Amino acid sequence: MRPAFALLVRRILRRWRRDLYPVLRIAAHRALRQVQFWVLALLIGIAAGFAALGFRLGISGVQRALYGADDLTLASVARDLPWAWVLVVPVLGGLVVGLILDRFTPDGRVRAVSDVIEGAALDGGRVEVREGLASAAASLITLGTGGSSGREGPVVHLAGVVSTAVARRIKASPMTGRELLGCAVAGAVAASFNAPIAGALFAHEVVLRHFATRAFAPIAIAAVAGTVINRLQFGGLTEFMLPVEPDLAFHIELPAFMVLGLVCALVAAAMMGGIFRADSLATRAMARIGWPRWSRPALAGLALGVIAIPFPHIIGVGYETTAAALSGQIGLGQAVMFAVVKALAVAITLGGRMGGGVFSPALVMGSLTGLAFGIIATTLAPGYSGSVNVYAFAGMAAVGAAVLGAPISTALIVFEMTGDWQTGIAVMTSVSLSSALASTLVRRSFFLTQLERRGIHLSEGPQAWLPHQLRVTPVIRALDAPDAPAEDLVRAMAERGPTVAPTTTLAEALPLFERSGAVFLAVTACDGPDDPLRLIGSVHHVDVLRALNQALEQTAAEEHG
């Protein structure tokens, strides 16, 4: 009996070694790699958090040196400064910005969130490092010297520079690079706004543009790390404090918040349209007068200085104005006038290529719009209305969501920035209708519209932009390949045309197949401008379709993994 039992045990151990042990070893290896990646996500979140914190403190330092106050009291202090100083400082800031961008960027353009989205989709999670650092410096100077924009755009790209350095160091795959980029963005946004939940969702909703379960844990870890960095410096305080407990009769006031959402969509569409029209107008004007491109930010600074003399609230990020709107300290006429002037200043700043982001200006515009709407609503129906603060609160979220094209993360950022979770129904009502109408009016978010204007069609999905990224090189059949057509047939095809080059994209090759009806096309190359074409091989329609299908499958697997 005992020998039989011992034999059974030996058989079980042998089978365990043969079958189960390799499985457990692979599982342990995968678990170890996952833990290592989580640790890396934590470190990237900390680094991105420090980058965001340093950027914010740098802006405050420049503002205090030049204006004697930071963004929380900047408008009030600037009102008492000599008008010449208020006029000259933005001009000098624009001049420095222009020289930086002219020296360190090929196109004189500041890198921001749209470039990070492009890097996530098209460049394996990598962004431009040299141009990104120059853009961060230019945006810091812009916001410190009177530019009317936000800090989230350069902060997000600066975080992308951090993750790109890590991805290059470890030679990360495109999928891993995108996840590292998401971690960096989450850490930076969380540190910038003290908003861990919104930071994680912003990375998914805006940058990666998917909610893959695999990426959620490391991104959440990075967002928490960034939040800790913020709270080590500023404590657990929210960015804005509502002065009173919101008073809202939900069943009566919800129609008003629905109308507010529609109004905010119109404001957001007008704001985005103004920025793009200002950019196009400035580009045409600079080409007509023939001035160097480094002078463009200085001219924008001059226009801002002129506006800032009577309206100092346009200087900087605009937190003082937002706080005043949320607390109801601004009247109806002032709110409307401040919103119009702020929109003009933002269009000048971004159209003048000075630097900065668009989210904080959207919050300012939204709070002023909501306050003006709330004053009117509570005046018309005082017995059925709550506080105007709630309208300012909802308007801030609604305009921000419409501009970013990110209703979930924007609403959460606003909640976490104010610490008020009691008016969620009102805010979500305004945000949902604002996002729906804005998507009809402008079709795309601000960032995707920026990319569209540069010829990058990410808004239409991977089936639209993947063919422009893939080249025929991997599917070329050499002349001597076993499965290649006879060389005489390929030469005859080359003589009849059309032909493709190794650098031809699938988006260029597919229409050639459709028009010619050919099964394959000849591939030719030229060594120099005066050299004859060389016959390299052939590329087949079925191979091109297979390559595109495999790329789409990989993208779908990553997005739903």
Image (tube, rainbow, N blue to C red):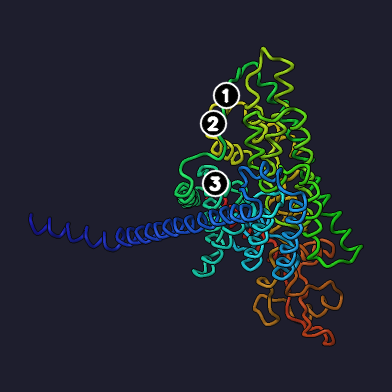
Q: In the rendering, at what x and y percent does residue 373 appear?
A: 73, 26
Q: Amino acid at mark 3?
A: Gly
The secondary structure type at the circle numbered 3 is helix
Q: Alpha-carbon distance for marks 3 and 1?
A: 25 Å
Q: Earlier in the sequence, mark 3 or mark 1?
A: 3
Q: Quadrant of the N terminus?
A: bottom left
Please, which residue is most extreme toward the right here? 288
In this view, the residue in front, 98 or 256, is 98
Q: Which quadrant holds residue 110? A: bottom right
Q: Amino acid at mark 2?
A: Asp
* Label 2 sits on residue: 420
In this view, the residue in front, 421 or 58, is 58
Please, which residue is most extreme toward the top here? 383
Total marks placed: 3
The secondary structure type at the circle numbered 1 is loop
Q: Tag on residue 246? A: 1
**Residue 196 in sight in this render:** yes
Other residues around mark 2 within 10 Å, as few (<14) / some (14–19) / many (≥20): some
Q: Residue placed at 84% from the left, 59% from the top? A: 283
Q: Tag on residue 199? A: 3
Q: Residue placed at 68% from the left, 61% from the top? A: 138
Vertical order, 169 against 265 (above or below): below
**Residue 560 in sight in this render:** no
Do callouts 2 and 1 mark residues in contact (Cβ within 8 Å)? yes
Q: Nearer the viewer, mark 2 or mark 3?
A: 2
Q: Amino acid at mark 1?
A: Pro
